[in-house]
Image: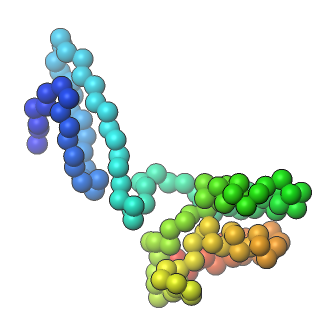
Amino acid sequence: MQLALNKGDLLFFNPALFHAAGTNRTADLHRMANLLQISSAFGKPMETVDRERMMLALYPVLQQQLEDDLLDAQELAAVIACTADGYSFPTNLDTDPPLKGLAPQTGQQLMVRALAERWNRAAFADGVEKMRDKRRG
């Protein structure tokens, strides 16, 4: 399907739609488009980020920063929000049921709990592995 668009036209489409730009064969015109990807608040981005690996790499650093009193609660929350997954889904609710609340534990909640309870690095790695296994279940 092709659409003839004029300067300033706006096009909205479902993010699940497969789309591609066609070849620009017009010699005397330079075309440009801005693509803004606006997702549902309940969606997950298409980009792949290895959040588990990031959590495992950052955990001992955060432990040390907290021990040295170099992070306040707001800074810690910001680092965890940028590192660990804050959304419980997708998951398998048969193997990863909600324990407290309406959704299973997130990576952010796991990281906050581990730091608050001062888990060692091995215990945290085990917790991350168990969470991953339950989600894949």
Residue 65 at x, y percent in the picture: 83, 56
> For the point 24% across and 17% down, which residue is it?
30
> For the point 14% across and 27% down, which residue is it?
6
Residue 99 at x, y percent in the picture: 57, 87
Residue 56 at x, y percent in the picture: 71, 62
Let me know if residue 83 appears in the view: no
> For the point 56% across and 64% down, which residue is it?
85
User: Measured along the vertical axis of the image, is residue 14 above or below residue 95?
Assistant: above
* Quadrant, the N terminus: top left
> For the point 47% across and 83% down, which residue is it?
102
State left or right for residue 20 relative to residue 123.
Answer: left
- Which residue in the rendered view is the most extreme toward the top? 28
- Which residue in the rendered view is the most extreme toward the right? 68
Q: How many marks?
A: 0
Let me know if residue 88 appears in the view: yes
Q: Nearer the viewer, residue 114 or 54?
A: 114
